[in-house]
Amino acid sequence: MTRDQVRQAVLDIIIDIAPDEDFSAIKDEENLRDQFDLDSMDFLDIVMELRKRFNLEVPEKDYPELISMASSVEYLFPRLKDWKLAS
Amino acid sequence: MRYDALIIGAGLSGLAAGIRLAMFDKKVLIVEKHVEIGGLNSFYTRKHRTFDVGLHAMTNYTPKGTRSSPLGKLLKQLRFRHEEFRLCQQVMSEIRFPEKALRFTNDFGFLEQEVAEQFPREADGFQKLVAHIRAFDELNLDDTEKISSRKILEHYLSDPLLIDMLYCPTMYYGNAREGDMDFYQFVIMFKSIFMEGFAKPVGGMPYILNLMLDKYQTLGGEIRMGCGVQSIASKDGELQAVHLADGATVQADKVISSAGYVETMRLCDSCGEDEKPDRVGQISFMESLFVLDREPKELGFDKSIIFFSTRPQFHYRVPDTLIDVTSGVFCCPNNFEYPEPLAEGMLRLTNMASFKMWDGLVRKDYRAAKKEQGRRAVEALLAFFPDFRDHVIYEDAFTPKTIHKYTGHLNGAVYGSPEKAKDGLTPVKNLFICGTDQGFLGIIGATLSGISMANRHVLQAEPNLENGRS
């Protein structure tokens, strides 16, 4: 996956998690929690979805890495770059 | 057969737990002893009419986009859009006592204004109480300190009438304890009724329940109806297997039961716990339903829900008689902002009732008593409300005995045990409690209970996620 694809993958997850939310104005550098009021239940879902979709384990000590879109991509890209998206 | 999780009961908490687990590819089975889903919030059909059992209105209404409210959390966790619940808000509700009435809507400011006008000397104390409630984290599962809400209310308010008027809706809609209420439960109910509000889904409980069941099954969840649990086998405090009433034995890593705490422990052979009588719930109701030949508002009923007491002092307790007609809840299901009016007018009346008294009647007397008590309950209303009896075209009623029969909850206890297992733990490892006895009440509360127990005890408890935790 490219960085853009990783970003899209994270975006797809949070769109699924919060279907009522409009993410078109998402600011990549800003805290997701503050922008969209995501709580600990939502972060659990992001982690669960990463496991389900990419077989990727994010240990609890790494949760802070998912604080913004930019930091999530930074953290996930090295772990997902060898992942082949189904075409 | 082996499952990641077995869920006992297809009520809202069981279905919600099932959805969460199936969503993350767990192999889940729900078993329900009744032939209909819904548990304490189910529905039934008589003469081609479908009646909701528990639902007057859904509490906790918040508009689309309110993210951190219980409803907002529930929608996100179960991945529903707000529109899918098809919620129609109340018009206006009321708490009516002999001397005073307080009206309220889904705008909390309206109630604050009413209190200031009706109880000018209490206005300041009420604001301080509200501030205390706002600051309180009632959803903390690990806070087990027991605080009496009566003490706190009496600290801020000096007029016992206002205290009783605030208790009338909060107790009727969610208190498992006689006379007093745990403060966190009071906060849950206060927020859900007054600060959030009432709404009804188009299509009632069958619609909401089927929406949840469809999602659960689409995600691959399995369900077995008309199939109760015979016993839960454990050895040395560890869960072994679950024996179903149809003779099947199910192996599951985790079991989440919505059957009630004592009810679940009774299913466990050799669970090693003595039964604690004070854990058995007592509070139950008789509900009378009246189908009318016209809209309730044509008969002078313009409120959505009225919580009333015909006496200045409100007593929330199991009566010594079949029912207590001196207080109750009066619901006009038509008075919600539906896009299309309901097909028929209806009124519903709830009164506190005694399981023991109803259970003591033989069949013939039971049927006569239902009629007689329904008549008494209506007569007690006539001092307060217009007479609607000439416009009733069909009536039905259910009692604590009915509730016990279909849900298995001891005493037909609608709000379960007064002692909640907030963390969902039981003496048996990997056997957990959700639903009324875990502690979040009401339709939204029960659903959140299932979600939080599934998250905490199954999804978050996975070994991989525990890495780096200790």
Image (spheres, coloured by chain):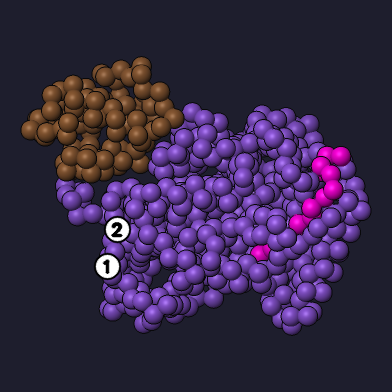
Chain colours: A brown, B purple
Res B425 seen here: no
- Please give the chain letter of the residue carrying mark 2: B
Question: Which of marks 2 and 1 precedes in the sequence?
Answer: 1
Asked if residue B309 lies left or right of residue B125, the reply is right
Which residue is labeled 1 in the image?
Answer: B2
Question: In the rendering, at what x and y percent does residue B75 appear?
Answer: 45, 39
The reply to whether the C-beta atoms of the residues labelled 1 and 2 are less than 8 Å apart is yes
Kind of residue sitting beneath label 2: Lys
Q: Which residue is mark 2?
A: B27
Question: Which residue corresponds to the image point at 29% horizontal and 33% vertical from the top-left?
Answer: A13
Above/below status of B220 relative to A20: below
Q: Amino acid at mark 1?
A: Arg
Answer few, some or many: residues within 10 Å of disc 1's Cα (few below 14, many 20 plus, some between 14 and 19): some
The residue located at (80%, 35%) in the rendering is B118
The image shows residue B355, relative to residue B454, as above or below, that is below
**Residue B136, label in figure:** none
- At horizontal 78% and vertical 69% (from top left) the residue drawn is B370
Residue B260 point in image, percent of width and height: 49, 67
Q: CA distance from mark 1 to mark 2?
A: 8 Å
Q: Is residue B317 magenta?
A: no
Where's residue B51, x and y in %? Answer: 67, 55
Q: How many marks?
A: 2
Q: Choose between B361 and B235: the one closer to the eye.
A: B361
> The N terminus of chain B lies in which quarter of the figure?
bottom left
Tell me which segment is drawn in magenta: B284-298
